[in-house]
Amino acid sequence: MTCRATMVVTGILPLQKLTLTHMMAAPKAERPLSRRQPAGRKSQQRVKEILQTGRDVFSEKGYERATTAEIAQRLGISEATVFSYFRGKRELCARVIGDWYDEIIDAIESGLPRDGTVRQQFAFIVRMHLRLMLVNGTGLCALVLSEGRSRQHELSEALVDLQRRYTAPLMRVLAHGQETGQIRRDMPLRLLRSMVFGPMEHVLWDATLVNRRTDIEATAERLIDVLWSALQPPDASLAALRQFRNVVGEATRQLEEAEAAHKAGDAAAVTRRTRKVTASGAA
């Protein structure tokens, strides 16, 4: 649930006609190969350290002001060591953002209530999207919002596949909602996706770039209510009233049957008492 959402609104490639089957599998985007693949445990640890420090520096300074020299300095290594694992700042930053996206995607995928209703799944995605970005990743979120959205930016190409993977859980929920009639079918999925992520992008802008304080939980609940209403089929209110009428009609039928059974039971009891009295008198 991260800034990938923000990029969804502006630069996503047009989607073909989507069905639930198409959206079930979202393969991970291929990462650019590092200059040197870490073979040993020591090399793997070094890569982890570079990525963690890179995340800190990119979060604090953004892409343009961050340098591989500062990352190396914080680690106490030479800049050449950084370049032995990554071709340059672009590749390192793309890997940092990719790892961050993976963490958020895993959190959404693992926590999504599979047996829940479409609305419950939708609410979970919106809520987790805001929580994860505003609590754990405001620095990287600001980086993507301010510098990673332009098609001309050197990070834009690396982010396209990440954006597609990031939006896949929501797209599956929306597709399922359309198939079951719980979400409007008169709009294509790509527009529904933008309708959901657009308002959340404004919240992120205010929180990360304008530094406006945001009550995450309250904001999430308001967004869920507003967005879910907008996602409903045009005749949802009429359908709800019809369903209510059917429920009331069924309840009325059951009540009438129960009352009839009760009256029949009372009549049978009176008959039994009368027979008992008659039998006693005859004796």
Image (cartoon, rainbow, N blue to C red):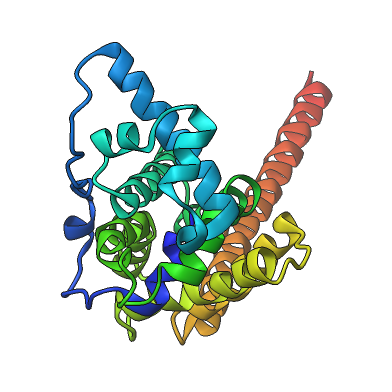
The quarter of the rendered structure image containing the C terminus is top right
Q: Position of residue 247 (x, y in %)?
A: 56, 65
In this view, the residue in front, 235 or 45, is 45
Taking the spot 67% from the left edge, 40% from the top edge, the residue there is 268
- Is residue 184 visible in the rendered structure shown here? no
187 with respect to 139 (left or right):
left
49 with respect to 138 (left or right):
left
Q: Position of residue 122 (x, y in %)?
A: 49, 59
90, above or below 45, in the image: below
Q: How many marks?
A: 0
In this view, the residue in front, 196 or 28, is 28
In the rendered image, which quarter is residue 260 located in?
A: bottom right
206, above or below 94, in the image: below
Q: Position of residue 186 (x, y in %)?
A: 33, 86
283, above or below 184, in the image: above
Taking the spot 38% from the left edge, 79% from the top edge, the residue there is 10
In the rendered image, which quarter is residue 100 located in?
A: top left
Q: Position of residue 195 (x, y in %)?
A: 46, 78
- Is residue 194 visible in the rendered structure shown here? yes
For this orientation, the residue located farthest to the top is 41
281 with respect to 64 (left or right):
right
233, above or below 74, in the image: below
Taking the spot 64% from the left edge, 63% from the top edge, the residue there is 208
208 with respect to 234 (left or right):
right
